[in-house]
Image: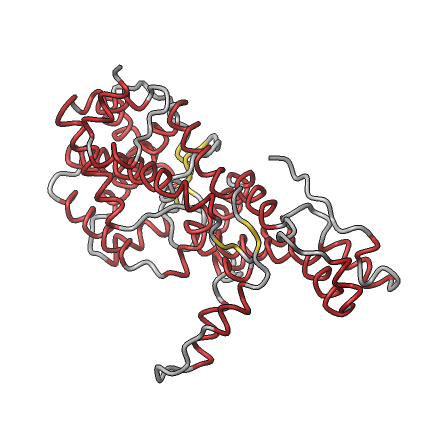
Amino acid sequence: MADDFTPPESGDNPFANLPMFGDLAKAMAGQGPLNWDAARQFAGIASNGGAGEPNVDPAIRIALADLARIIEMHVRDLTAIDTQFPEITPVTKGVWAQRTLEAYRPLFTELATSLGRRAEGSDVEALADSDPMMAMMANLSQMMAPAMMGMAVGSMVGRMAGRTFGQYDLPIPRSDHALLVVPATIDQFATEWALPIDEMRLWVLAQEMIGHTLFNIPALRDQFTALVRQHVGAFRPDPSAVADKLTSLDMDDGGDPMQAMQRLLSDPALLLGAVQSPEQALHAPQLDAAVAAVVGTVDYLVDAVAARVIGGDALRIAEAVRRRRLETSPDDLFVERLLGLQLTQEQVQRGKTFTAGVADRVGEGRLTELLGKPNPLPTPAELEAPGLWIARLEL
Protein backbone atom coordinates (compact mmCIF):
# COMPACT_ATOMS: atom_id res chain seq x y z
CA MET A 1 0.00 0.00 0.00
CA ALA A 2 1.37 3.44 -0.85
CA ASP A 3 2.22 5.98 1.84
CA ASP A 4 -1.03 7.83 1.21
CA PHE A 5 -1.38 9.32 4.68
CA THR A 6 -2.67 12.89 4.73
CA PRO A 7 -1.40 15.07 7.59
CA PRO A 8 -3.87 17.26 9.43
CA GLU A 9 -4.97 20.42 7.67
CA SER A 10 -3.28 23.60 8.83
CA GLY A 11 -6.51 24.58 10.53
CA ASP A 12 -6.12 21.58 12.79
CA ASN A 13 -2.52 22.48 13.67
CA PRO A 14 -2.49 23.94 17.20
CA PHE A 15 0.92 25.51 16.46
CA ALA A 16 0.05 26.97 13.04
CA ASN A 17 0.69 30.55 14.19
CA LEU A 18 3.93 29.69 16.04
CA PRO A 19 6.58 29.30 13.30
CA MET A 20 9.07 27.18 15.24
CA PHE A 21 6.46 24.77 16.57
CA GLY A 22 4.65 24.79 13.26
CA ASP A 23 7.80 23.60 11.51
CA LEU A 24 8.24 20.93 14.16
CA ALA A 25 4.69 19.72 13.63
CA LYS A 26 5.26 19.54 9.87
CA ALA A 27 8.45 17.54 10.40
CA MET A 28 6.70 15.10 12.70
CA ALA A 29 3.93 14.45 10.16
CA GLY A 30 5.94 14.89 6.98
CA GLN A 31 6.76 11.29 6.12
CA GLY A 32 3.33 9.75 5.84
CA PRO A 33 1.81 7.47 8.46
CA LEU A 34 5.22 6.31 9.75
CA ASN A 35 8.37 8.38 10.22
CA TRP A 36 11.07 6.18 8.67
CA ASP A 37 13.95 8.37 9.85
CA ALA A 38 12.84 7.78 13.43
CA ALA A 39 12.36 4.07 12.72
CA ARG A 40 15.89 3.70 11.35
CA GLN A 41 17.46 5.64 14.23
CA PHE A 42 15.66 3.67 16.93
CA ALA A 43 16.33 0.35 15.18
CA GLY A 44 20.04 1.13 15.28
CA ILE A 45 19.94 2.05 18.96
CA ALA A 46 17.90 -1.00 19.98
CA SER A 47 19.92 -3.51 17.95
CA ASN A 48 23.31 -2.79 19.47
CA GLY A 49 22.83 -0.14 22.11
CA GLY A 50 24.09 2.50 19.75
CA ALA A 51 27.61 1.05 19.87
CA GLY A 52 29.68 0.28 16.81
CA GLU A 53 29.93 -3.28 15.53
CA PRO A 54 32.92 -4.82 13.79
CA ASN A 55 32.37 -6.04 10.24
CA VAL A 56 31.89 -9.76 9.77
CA ASP A 57 35.25 -11.53 9.55
CA PRO A 58 35.96 -12.61 5.93
CA ALA A 59 36.93 -16.05 7.26
CA ILE A 60 33.41 -16.45 8.64
CA ARG A 61 31.93 -15.45 5.29
CA ILE A 62 34.00 -18.12 3.53
CA ALA A 63 33.10 -20.76 6.12
CA LEU A 64 29.37 -20.04 5.80
CA ALA A 65 29.54 -20.14 1.99
CA ASP A 66 31.21 -23.57 2.16
CA LEU A 67 28.59 -24.89 4.59
CA ALA A 68 25.78 -23.44 2.45
CA ARG A 69 26.81 -25.57 -0.50
CA ILE A 70 26.35 -28.68 1.64
CA ILE A 71 22.88 -27.60 2.79
CA GLU A 72 21.70 -26.57 -0.69
CA MET A 73 22.08 -30.09 -2.04
CA HIS A 74 20.03 -31.66 0.75
CA VAL A 75 17.29 -29.02 0.68
CA ARG A 76 16.82 -29.48 -3.06
CA ASP A 77 16.71 -33.26 -2.65
CA LEU A 78 14.25 -33.19 0.25
CA THR A 79 11.85 -30.60 -1.18
CA ALA A 80 12.04 -31.84 -4.80
CA ILE A 81 12.42 -28.20 -5.92
CA ASP A 82 15.43 -27.00 -7.86
CA THR A 83 15.52 -23.69 -6.03
CA GLN A 84 18.02 -21.01 -7.00
CA PHE A 85 19.14 -19.74 -3.61
CA PRO A 86 20.22 -16.13 -3.05
CA GLU A 87 23.69 -15.54 -1.71
CA ILE A 88 24.19 -16.20 1.99
CA THR A 89 25.02 -12.77 3.40
CA PRO A 90 26.48 -12.59 6.92
CA VAL A 91 25.65 -9.22 8.53
CA THR A 92 25.88 -7.41 11.84
CA LYS A 93 22.84 -6.89 14.05
CA GLY A 94 22.57 -3.26 12.98
CA VAL A 95 22.62 -4.08 9.27
CA TRP A 96 20.03 -6.83 9.82
CA ALA A 97 17.74 -4.31 11.53
CA GLN A 98 17.98 -1.77 8.70
CA ARG A 99 17.47 -4.37 5.97
CA THR A 100 14.51 -5.85 7.84
CA LEU A 101 12.84 -2.47 8.27
CA GLU A 102 12.99 -2.00 4.52
CA ALA A 103 11.80 -5.56 3.80
CA TYR A 104 8.77 -5.15 6.08
CA ARG A 105 8.06 -1.59 4.98
CA PRO A 106 4.78 -2.42 3.14
CA LEU A 107 3.41 -4.21 6.22
CA PHE A 108 4.41 -1.49 8.67
CA THR A 109 3.02 1.19 6.37
CA GLU A 110 -0.30 -0.62 6.22
CA LEU A 111 -0.25 -1.03 10.00
CA ALA A 112 0.45 2.67 10.53
CA THR A 113 -2.26 3.64 8.05
CA SER A 114 -4.87 1.54 9.81
CA LEU A 115 -3.88 2.97 13.20
CA GLY A 116 -3.79 6.50 11.81
CA ARG A 117 -7.49 6.57 11.03
CA ARG A 118 -9.69 8.70 13.20
CA ALA A 119 -11.47 6.61 15.78
CA GLU A 120 -15.11 6.06 14.98
CA GLY A 121 -17.35 8.66 16.49
CA SER A 122 -14.52 11.17 17.05
CA ASP A 123 -15.46 14.70 16.11
CA VAL A 124 -12.68 17.18 16.78
CA GLU A 125 -14.72 20.14 15.50
CA ALA A 126 -17.52 19.40 17.97
CA LEU A 127 -14.94 18.89 20.70
CA ALA A 128 -13.35 22.24 19.87
CA ASP A 129 -16.62 24.01 20.70
CA SER A 130 -16.99 22.30 24.07
CA ASP A 131 -13.34 21.83 25.11
CA PRO A 132 -10.73 23.64 22.99
CA MET A 133 -7.82 22.28 25.05
CA MET A 134 -8.89 18.67 24.51
CA ALA A 135 -9.33 19.37 20.80
CA MET A 136 -5.81 20.80 20.61
CA MET A 137 -4.39 17.74 22.38
CA ALA A 138 -6.27 15.41 20.04
CA ASN A 139 -4.78 17.18 17.00
CA LEU A 140 -1.32 17.20 18.57
CA SER A 141 -1.59 13.48 19.21
CA GLN A 142 -2.47 12.88 15.56
CA MET A 143 0.49 14.93 14.37
CA MET A 144 2.86 13.04 16.65
CA ALA A 145 1.53 9.63 15.60
CA PRO A 146 3.95 9.09 12.65
CA ALA A 147 6.98 9.81 14.85
CA MET A 148 5.63 7.63 17.67
CA MET A 149 4.94 4.83 15.20
CA GLY A 150 8.43 5.17 13.75
CA MET A 151 10.05 5.00 17.18
CA ALA A 152 7.96 2.00 18.22
CA VAL A 153 8.50 0.01 15.02
CA GLY A 154 12.21 0.83 14.94
CA SER A 155 12.66 -0.22 18.55
CA MET A 156 10.78 -3.48 18.00
CA VAL A 157 12.79 -4.44 14.93
CA GLY A 158 15.99 -3.47 16.74
CA ARG A 159 15.13 -5.80 19.61
CA MET A 160 14.52 -8.58 17.11
CA ALA A 161 17.92 -7.91 15.56
CA GLY A 162 19.57 -8.41 18.93
CA ARG A 163 18.58 -12.05 19.08
CA THR A 164 17.79 -13.29 15.57
CA PHE A 165 19.77 -15.97 13.72
CA GLY A 166 18.56 -15.04 10.23
CA GLN A 167 15.73 -13.50 8.29
CA TYR A 168 13.31 -16.43 8.58
CA ASP A 169 13.25 -16.62 12.37
CA LEU A 170 10.07 -14.66 11.69
CA PRO A 171 7.96 -16.40 9.02
CA ILE A 172 7.30 -13.46 6.71
CA PRO A 173 7.97 -13.53 2.94
CA ARG A 174 10.76 -11.17 1.93
CA SER A 175 12.01 -9.88 -1.38
CA ASP A 176 15.68 -9.58 -0.35
CA HIS A 177 18.07 -10.81 -3.02
CA ALA A 178 20.16 -12.40 -0.27
CA LEU A 179 19.72 -14.62 2.76
CA LEU A 180 20.77 -12.61 5.80
CA VAL A 181 22.33 -14.40 8.78
CA VAL A 182 23.85 -12.92 11.94
CA PRO A 183 27.02 -14.92 12.74
CA ALA A 184 27.67 -13.17 16.05
CA THR A 185 24.34 -14.35 17.44
CA ILE A 186 24.62 -17.85 15.96
CA ASP A 187 28.10 -18.41 17.35
CA GLN A 188 27.25 -16.92 20.74
CA PHE A 189 24.24 -19.23 21.05
CA ALA A 190 26.37 -22.25 20.12
CA THR A 191 28.93 -21.32 22.78
CA GLU A 192 26.30 -20.76 25.49
CA TRP A 193 24.72 -24.15 24.80
CA ALA A 194 28.03 -26.00 24.26
CA LEU A 195 27.10 -26.83 20.67
CA PRO A 196 29.64 -27.26 17.84
CA ILE A 197 29.70 -23.92 16.01
CA ASP A 198 29.80 -25.41 12.50
CA GLU A 199 26.82 -27.64 13.27
CA MET A 200 24.84 -24.71 14.65
CA ARG A 201 25.65 -22.77 11.48
CA LEU A 202 24.48 -25.71 9.37
CA TRP A 203 21.19 -25.81 11.29
CA VAL A 204 20.56 -22.08 10.75
CA LEU A 205 21.44 -22.31 7.06
CA ALA A 206 18.95 -25.16 6.71
CA GLN A 207 16.24 -23.02 8.32
CA GLU A 208 17.01 -20.07 6.05
CA MET A 209 17.09 -22.09 2.84
CA ILE A 210 13.91 -24.00 3.65
CA GLY A 211 12.14 -20.77 4.60
CA HIS A 212 13.24 -19.28 1.28
CA THR A 213 12.12 -22.39 -0.61
CA LEU A 214 8.62 -22.36 0.88
CA PHE A 215 8.06 -18.62 0.44
CA ASN A 216 9.33 -18.88 -3.11
CA ILE A 217 6.23 -20.98 -3.93
CA PRO A 218 3.90 -18.34 -5.44
CA ALA A 219 0.58 -19.75 -4.22
CA LEU A 220 1.81 -20.14 -0.63
CA ARG A 221 3.57 -16.78 -0.56
CA ASP A 222 0.61 -14.87 -1.97
CA GLN A 223 -1.97 -16.43 0.33
CA PHE A 224 0.18 -16.05 3.45
CA THR A 225 1.02 -12.42 2.65
CA ALA A 226 -2.65 -11.64 2.05
CA LEU A 227 -3.61 -13.09 5.45
CA VAL A 228 -0.99 -11.04 7.30
CA ARG A 229 -1.89 -7.85 5.43
CA GLN A 230 -5.56 -8.47 6.16
CA HIS A 231 -4.66 -8.58 9.86
CA VAL A 232 -2.49 -5.45 9.98
CA GLY A 233 -4.96 -3.50 7.87
CA ALA A 234 -7.84 -4.28 10.23
CA PHE A 235 -6.54 -2.55 13.36
CA ARG A 236 -8.83 0.14 14.67
CA PRO A 237 -7.40 2.93 16.86
CA ASP A 238 -8.63 3.22 20.43
CA PRO A 239 -7.38 6.46 22.02
CA SER A 240 -9.02 5.50 25.33
CA ALA A 241 -7.08 2.22 25.59
CA VAL A 242 -4.37 3.62 27.88
CA ALA A 243 -6.85 5.31 30.20
CA ASP A 244 -8.99 2.16 30.41
CA LYS A 245 -5.96 0.01 31.21
CA LEU A 246 -4.73 2.42 33.86
CA THR A 247 -8.07 2.40 35.64
CA SER A 248 -8.12 -1.41 35.59
CA LEU A 249 -4.64 -1.85 37.13
CA ASP A 250 -4.81 -4.13 40.15
CA MET A 251 -2.85 -2.43 42.92
CA ASP A 252 -4.09 -4.72 45.68
CA ASP A 253 -1.81 -7.71 45.00
CA GLY A 254 1.09 -6.37 47.05
CA GLY A 255 3.17 -5.57 43.96
CA ASP A 256 4.91 -2.33 43.12
CA PRO A 257 2.34 -0.04 41.44
CA MET A 258 5.10 1.84 39.59
CA GLN A 259 6.47 -1.39 38.13
CA ALA A 260 2.95 -2.44 37.12
CA MET A 261 2.46 0.90 35.35
CA GLN A 262 5.87 0.66 33.68
CA ARG A 263 5.01 -2.80 32.34
CA LEU A 264 1.72 -1.48 31.06
CA LEU A 265 3.19 1.54 29.32
CA SER A 266 6.03 -0.47 27.76
CA ASP A 267 3.52 -2.23 25.51
CA PRO A 268 3.71 -0.43 22.14
CA ALA A 269 0.49 -2.06 20.99
CA LEU A 270 -1.30 -0.29 23.82
CA LEU A 271 0.50 3.01 23.40
CA LEU A 272 -0.30 3.02 19.70
CA GLY A 273 -3.94 2.27 20.44
CA ALA A 274 -3.75 -1.07 18.60
CA VAL A 275 -6.64 -3.15 19.83
CA GLN A 276 -8.00 -6.25 18.17
CA SER A 277 -10.97 -5.44 15.98
CA PRO A 278 -13.95 -7.74 15.42
CA GLU A 279 -12.66 -8.34 11.88
CA GLN A 280 -9.29 -9.49 13.23
CA ALA A 281 -10.93 -11.76 15.78
CA LEU A 282 -13.01 -13.33 13.00
CA HIS A 283 -9.99 -14.09 10.82
CA ALA A 284 -7.54 -14.99 13.61
CA PRO A 285 -8.20 -18.77 13.49
CA GLN A 286 -7.31 -18.90 9.77
CA LEU A 287 -4.13 -16.88 10.26
CA ASP A 288 -3.18 -19.03 13.25
CA ALA A 289 -3.65 -22.19 11.17
CA ALA A 290 -1.57 -20.74 8.33
CA VAL A 291 1.28 -19.73 10.65
CA ALA A 292 1.23 -23.12 12.37
CA ALA A 293 1.38 -24.94 9.03
CA VAL A 294 4.24 -22.82 7.65
CA VAL A 295 6.37 -22.83 10.81
CA GLY A 296 5.61 -26.50 11.45
CA THR A 297 6.61 -27.41 7.90
CA VAL A 298 9.86 -25.45 8.17
CA ASP A 299 10.70 -27.15 11.49
CA TYR A 300 9.83 -30.58 10.13
CA LEU A 301 12.01 -30.14 7.05
CA VAL A 302 14.86 -28.57 9.03
CA ASP A 303 14.83 -31.60 11.33
CA ALA A 304 15.01 -33.87 8.29
CA VAL A 305 17.94 -31.98 6.74
CA ALA A 306 19.75 -31.69 10.08
CA ALA A 307 19.45 -35.44 10.65
CA ARG A 308 21.24 -35.97 7.34
CA VAL A 309 24.10 -33.50 7.72
CA ILE A 310 24.53 -33.09 11.47
CA GLY A 311 23.61 -36.48 12.86
CA GLY A 312 23.32 -36.97 16.61
CA ASP A 313 23.72 -33.30 17.55
CA ALA A 314 20.68 -32.35 15.46
CA LEU A 315 18.33 -33.23 18.32
CA ARG A 316 20.41 -31.24 20.81
CA ILE A 317 20.29 -28.18 18.59
CA ALA A 318 16.54 -28.50 17.97
CA GLU A 319 15.91 -28.82 21.72
CA ALA A 320 18.12 -25.81 22.49
CA VAL A 321 16.29 -23.66 19.92
CA ARG A 322 12.93 -24.89 21.26
CA ARG A 323 13.88 -23.86 24.80
CA ARG A 324 15.08 -20.50 23.50
CA ARG A 325 11.63 -19.92 22.00
CA LEU A 326 9.96 -20.75 25.31
CA GLU A 327 12.23 -18.37 27.20
CA THR A 328 11.67 -15.44 24.86
CA SER A 329 10.70 -12.30 26.76
CA PRO A 330 7.28 -10.83 25.95
CA ASP A 331 9.16 -7.60 25.16
CA ASP A 332 10.76 -9.39 22.20
CA LEU A 333 7.46 -10.49 20.70
CA PHE A 334 5.86 -7.14 19.85
CA VAL A 335 6.42 -7.44 16.10
CA GLU A 336 4.90 -10.92 16.11
CA ARG A 337 1.88 -9.65 18.02
CA LEU A 338 1.29 -6.66 15.75
CA LEU A 339 1.58 -8.85 12.66
CA GLY A 340 -0.76 -11.47 14.14
CA LEU A 341 1.84 -14.25 14.34
CA GLN A 342 1.33 -16.81 17.09
CA LEU A 343 4.66 -18.62 17.44
CA THR A 344 4.11 -20.45 20.70
CA GLN A 345 5.53 -23.93 21.16
CA GLU A 346 1.97 -25.29 21.03
CA GLN A 347 1.43 -23.63 17.65
CA VAL A 348 4.70 -24.98 16.28
CA GLN A 349 3.88 -28.48 17.50
CA ARG A 350 0.43 -28.34 15.90
CA GLY A 351 2.10 -27.45 12.62
CA LYS A 352 4.73 -30.20 12.87
CA THR A 353 2.03 -32.77 13.68
CA PHE A 354 0.07 -31.61 10.64
CA THR A 355 3.14 -31.82 8.38
CA ALA A 356 4.07 -35.26 9.71
CA GLY A 357 0.51 -36.43 9.03
CA VAL A 358 0.73 -35.20 5.45
CA ALA A 359 4.15 -36.80 4.92
CA ASP A 360 2.88 -40.11 6.29
CA ARG A 361 0.09 -40.10 3.72
CA VAL A 362 1.81 -38.75 0.59
CA GLY A 363 5.54 -38.84 1.35
CA GLU A 364 7.96 -35.99 2.12
CA GLY A 365 8.67 -35.44 -1.56
CA ARG A 366 5.11 -34.25 -2.25
CA LEU A 367 4.89 -31.69 0.55
CA THR A 368 6.05 -28.80 -1.59
CA GLU A 369 4.00 -30.03 -4.55
CA LEU A 370 0.81 -29.73 -2.52
CA LEU A 371 1.86 -26.34 -1.15
CA GLY A 372 2.02 -25.12 -4.75
CA LYS A 373 -1.69 -25.79 -5.34
CA PRO A 374 -4.21 -22.89 -5.31
CA ASN A 375 -5.05 -21.72 -1.77
CA PRO A 376 -2.65 -24.21 -0.21
CA LEU A 377 -2.78 -23.10 3.42
CA PRO A 378 -4.97 -25.28 5.65
CA THR A 379 -8.12 -24.15 7.36
CA PRO A 380 -8.30 -24.63 11.15
CA ALA A 381 -10.24 -27.86 10.63
CA GLU A 382 -7.74 -29.13 8.04
CA LEU A 383 -4.81 -28.39 10.35
CA GLU A 384 -6.25 -30.95 12.78
CA ALA A 385 -7.15 -33.41 9.99
CA PRO A 386 -4.42 -33.52 7.30
CA GLY A 387 -6.45 -35.98 5.25
CA LEU A 388 -9.09 -33.30 4.66
CA TRP A 389 -6.42 -30.88 3.42
CA ILE A 390 -4.95 -33.43 1.02
CA ALA A 391 -8.40 -34.33 -0.31
CA ARG A 392 -9.25 -30.66 -0.97
CA LEU A 393 -6.04 -29.94 -2.84
CA GLU A 394 -6.16 -33.09 -4.94
CA LEU A 395 -9.73 -32.66 -6.16
Asked if 334 appears above or below 312 in the picture, the reply is below
Asked if 234 appears above or below 331 in the picture, the reply is above
Q: Residue furthest left?
A: 312
Q: Quadrant of residue 283?
A: top left
Q: Residue furthest top?
A: 395
Q: Quadrant of residue 132?
A: bottom right
Asked if 242 appears above or below 106 in the picture, the reply is below
Residue 337 in percent (x, y) is at: 42, 51
Q: Nearer the viewer, residue 367 or 42?
A: 367
Residue 110 in percent (x, y) is at: 57, 41
Q: Assign the C terminus to one quadrant of the image.
A: top left
Residue 222 in percent (x, y) is at: 44, 27
Residue 287 in percent (x, y) is at: 37, 39
Q: Residue at 33% across / 19% down in the picture? A: 373
Q: Quadrant of residue 313?
A: top left
Q: Residue at 82% across / 59% down in the picture? A: 22
Q: Nearer the viewer, residue 92 or 43?
A: 43
Left or right side of 130 for 3: left
* Callout count: 0
Colour treatment of the image: secondary structure
Q: Nearer the viewer, residue 150 or 126?
A: 126
Q: Assign the N terminus to one quadrant of the image.
A: top right
Left or right side of 366 for 212: right
Q: Residue at 34% across / 28% down in the picture? A: 214
